[in-house]
Amino acid sequence: MKNRLKAFLLVCLSPLSVSAAELALDPASFFDANFTIDSTYTRDGQNYEVSASGEAGPYGRVYLSYEFTDKQDLGDRGEYTGHAWTQNGETVATATLQGVYYKDGRTFRIYGLNTLSDGKFHFAEGAIDFVAKTMTFKVADIKTGD
């Protein structure tokens, strides 16, 4: 009876779970993005803005700007929005950035979804170390069926 109850709950609750397959990442598209924090500041002691520059795989030199907020008043975690741009030759590419962060020891973990001017969507996962002035990410294209 106990095993039947477990099986019943598993079948009933499994549609509520999210799997990595639902966010289909293109395995051939993964790249590293490594940035140096150029500046950080706050205007109000609650929201923080960060500018960074570095190398992002196929995009070459990229410039980022972020605004980190804590709209739910969670203390050590919150959300962010931002922008990115790069220029390769005559081609300029831009992106909007959005996601969540949380403090993990001396670093901040960050998970984001990015919309690019070339029509791609990216998933980015990384770490921010304000002491070392670094931002490092693993980035991949999200499959969209195009």
Image (cartoon, rainbow, N blue to C red):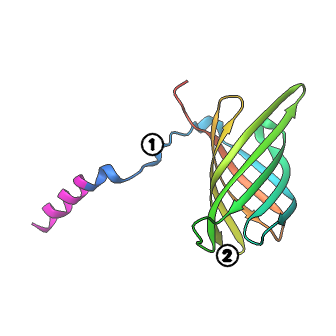
State the residue position of label 1.
22
- Say which of 82 and 133 sits in front: 82
Give the crowd class for mark 1: few <14, some 14-19, many >=20 residues within 10 Å: few
Determine the secondary structure under disc 1. helix
- Say which of 4 and 88 sits in front: 88
* Image location (x, y in percent) of residue 66: 76, 54
The disc label shown at residue 105, or none: 2
Main SS of residues in magenta: helix
Would you place residue 136 above or below residue 84 in this image? below
Taking the image as shown, residue 115 lies to the left or right of residue 17, namely right
Instruction: Classify residue 109 by image quadrant.
Output: bottom right
Region rendered in magenta: 1-12
At a point 76% along the width and 45% down the height, the residue shown is: 83
Instruction: Classify residue 104 by image quadrant.
Output: bottom right
Q: Residue furthest left?
A: 1
Instruction: Classify residue 27 by image quadrant.
Output: top right
- Residue type, mark 2 in image: Gly
At a point 80% along the width and 49% down the height, the residue shown is: 64
